[in-house]
Image (cartoon, helix red, strand yellow):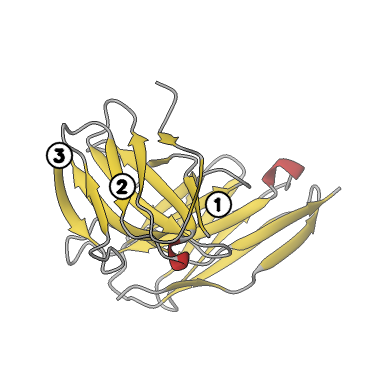
Amino acid sequence: GESVGLHLPTLSVQEGDNSIINCAYSNSASDYFIWYKQESGKGPQFIIDIRSNMDKRQGQRVTVLLNKTVKHLSLQIAATQPGDSAVYFCAGDSMDTGRRALTFGSGTRLQVQP
Amino acid sequence: DTGVSQNPRHKITKRGQNVTFRCDPISEHNRLYWYRQTLGQGPEFLTYFQNEAQLEKSRLLSDRFSAERPKGSFSTLEIQRTEQGDSAMYLCASSSWDSLYGYTFGSGTRLTVV
């Protein structure tokens, strides 16, 4: 089955710095990944997604990188702001079995220091 | 329609009691998902509906759990004979047919079994 995990439980950065949150997955058949942001007391909020036929995708202040060789993806946040403080989850799925369910990692808490 | 609505936001119940949660998805979304999230962990998939049909259930969904979406709109999740291990945040998400994974989560129902 799918297993998705994160390297660090907490990441602390200074306001204005760039943040990098990492994620590893175990299922080589995984072909779709999403990054979510979750603030306290709220549900996960979609940030950006990437399919396995891509290595990189950019959004507004965010970039996701996918390395299928080592089964690793990362979320880069440029010019981190206090409002970016939250828990970040990566989630993945494989369409080879036609599943419609994402497997989430345990999350990384991003703390932005002023 | 401002998003996915879940009720109640919080529920405290005694062990052995039955509880029911409701989810109102975004009106034009035909896909609806239930997830469970425990403290410090990512959401875990429970079940998935496409319109009124329940297409997939996780092994986490024991026989004490039942979910319905009778008219393809709102959904209910019932837990019978609650146990302390059922204490968690129950999240609902919905998506349209053309945004399979970029789906919108509600704020969840936090269940505490005492």
Cα gap from disc 1 to disc 3, whole angstroms: 37 Å
Residue type at mark 2: give it: Leu
Graded by Cα atoms within 10 Å as few (under 14), some (14 to 19) or many (20 or more), the crowding at tag 3 reads some
Select label 1 or label 2 by which is in front. 2
Q: In the image, what residue occupies the spot 34% across and 32% down?
A: B24
Q: Can see residue B94?
A: yes
Chain of the residue where label 1 is placed in the rendered structure: A
Q: Which residue is mark 2?
A: B77
Q: Is residue A74 above or below residue A48?
A: below
Give the image location of residue A78, x and y in percent. 68, 49
Say which chain tag 2 marks: B
Q: CA distance from mark 3 to mark 2?
A: 14 Å
* N-terminal label among 3 and 2: 3
Q: Is residue B85 above or below residue B1?
A: below
Q: Amino acid at mark 1?
A: Thr
Q: Which residue is mark 3?
A: B52
Q: Secondary structure at mark 3?
A: loop
**Can you tell which mark lies on residue A63?**
1
**Chain bearing mark 3:** B
In three-dimensional space, the C-alpha distance between marks 1 and 2, rounded to whole angstroms, equals 36 Å
